[in-house]
Image (cartoon, rainbow, N blue to C red):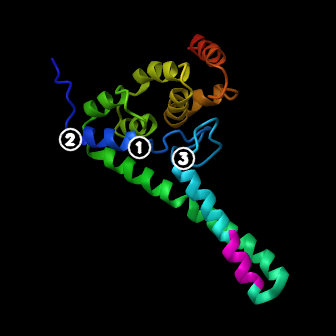
Amino acid sequence: MKDSSPSQPVRSMRVLSLSHLRADAGQPARPLSFAHRNGSRFTIYDLFFLAAICAGIGVGGAAGAELHGMVGGAAGALAGGWIGFLVGRLPELLVLNWLASSLTTVPADELRDFLHDPDCHIHNLVLLELQRRGENIHQELGGILDMMAANDVSRRGLGWAALNSAFPDLARQLGDYSVGDSAEECRRKIRQLRSEF
């Protein structure tokens, strides 16, 4: 019988996952994109993003107004807001990239164990790492669909992110799925999808 206690790499992943790092990136997109989040929670990364935009608008507008009056202020605010938009997503992107690269050293069986751990909040990254190694991830689809039909909206969000990342073709078939819908509505859509394969 396999020892159920995880090795050190999985323990470190569990600690990271408990900090609720963004793993629910939303609509069909790669997992490190920042598309519409389809009902996901507001995180510290979102706060940093908004603060960076506001700071960019304020600093850009003030600098532009100082140099070229009202027109310069408007142009500076637009430029500053755009720079804030870009800079504001860097922390989230860097953390997700670091987290994804840390999975490359974990054995496949430990990744699968972690995937079924209730503390796992990075299903999409784990599935993509298994897929990158040539592992068959289709056996995990049932669990992902179960997550998408869960009563808990955050659990549905994790499942939706995993489906978008690892099974984008199936996610496109569920174009009207929203984690913010009622649990019964989500279950109805998942039942319909299951009936098609």
Which residue does the image show at 63% across and 19% down from the upper left?
186
In what quadrant of the picture does the N terminus appear?
A: top left
**Residue 184 location, quadrant:** top right
Tell me: residue 72, above or below residue 30.
Answer: below
Tell me: residue 186, above or below residue 135.
Answer: above
Residue 23 percent location from the top left of the image: 48, 41
Q: Residues within 10 Å of mark 1 (few under 14, many from 20)?
A: few
Which comes before the other along the chain, label 1 or label 2?
2
Residue beneath label 1, please?
19
Q: Label for residue 8?
A: 2
Which comes before the other along the chain, label 3 or label 1?
1
Question: Badges 1 and 2: C-beta atoms under 8 Å apart?
Answer: no
Farthest residue to the bottom: give it. 67
Q: Nearer the viewer, residue 182 or 134?
A: 182
Which span is picked out in magenta?
57-65
* Kind of residue indicated by mark 1: Ser
* Predominant SS of the magenta segment: helix
Residue beneath label 3, please?
43
Q: Residues within 10 Å of mark 3 (few under 14, many from 20)?
A: few
Helix, strand or loop at mark 2: helix
Q: Is residue 156 magenta?
A: no
Helix, strand or loop at mark 1: loop
Give the Cα separation between the discs numbered 2 and 3: 27 Å
